């Protein structure tokens, strides 16, 4: 059996973080949510407090910060010596926007 994976959820919306945490608890008991952050700054600070984080569920569009906050945080995380994996998450309205952009650029 594989041990538990420590993960962090980064999303500016509390309800989105809570829903994802509940989904992970129900469907992926091998994930242990050890940290949650509402901003990229908060997430970066938590990464220093929890050096053993295996993965980050990261909102690609953190509305409380600039348009690129999620991507900038992902870039910073990837530069860490022992970088955790990243899963980008976003709300349904943002998925539609990103799909349209992909379609336009073809």
Image: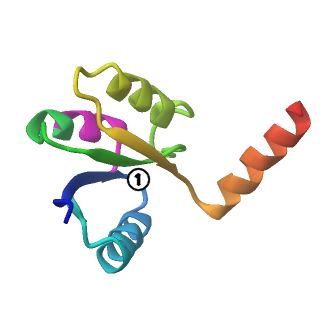
In this orientation, which residue lies closer to the viewer: 39 or 95?
95
Give the residue at x 56% y 54%.
90
Residue 59 falls left or right of residue 83:
right
What residue is drawn where x is 78% and y is 48%? 99
**Along the horizontal axis of the image, is 61 left or right of 100?**
left
How far across and down, in percent of the image, does residue 55 sit? 31, 46
In the figure, is residue 105 to the left or right of 59?
Answer: right
| Residue 96 % position (x, y) | 75, 55
Residue indicated by mark 1: 11
Question: Residue 52 falls in which quadrant of the image?
Answer: top left
**Magenta stretch: includes residue 41:** yes
Q: Quadrant of the N terminus?
A: bottom left
Which region is colored magenta? Answer: 34-45
Image point (27%, 40%), residue name: 43
Q: Could you tell me if residue 39 is visible in this image?
A: yes
Whether residue 65 is situated above or below residue 80 in the rendered picture: below
């Amino acid at each position: 059996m594989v041990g538990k994976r420590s993960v962090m959820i980064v999303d500016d919306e509390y309800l989105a973080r809570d829903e994802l945490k509940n989904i992970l608890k129900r469907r992926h008991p091998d994930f242990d949510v050890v940290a949650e952050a509402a901003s990229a700054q908060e997430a970066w600070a938590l990464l220093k407090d929890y050096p053993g984080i295996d993965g980050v569920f990261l909102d690609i569009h953190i509305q409380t910060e600039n348009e690129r906050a999620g991507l900038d945080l992902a870039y910073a995380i990837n530069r860490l010596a022992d970088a955790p994996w990243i899963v980008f998450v976003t709300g349904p309205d943002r998925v539609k926007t990103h799909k349209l952009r992909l379609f336009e650029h073809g």
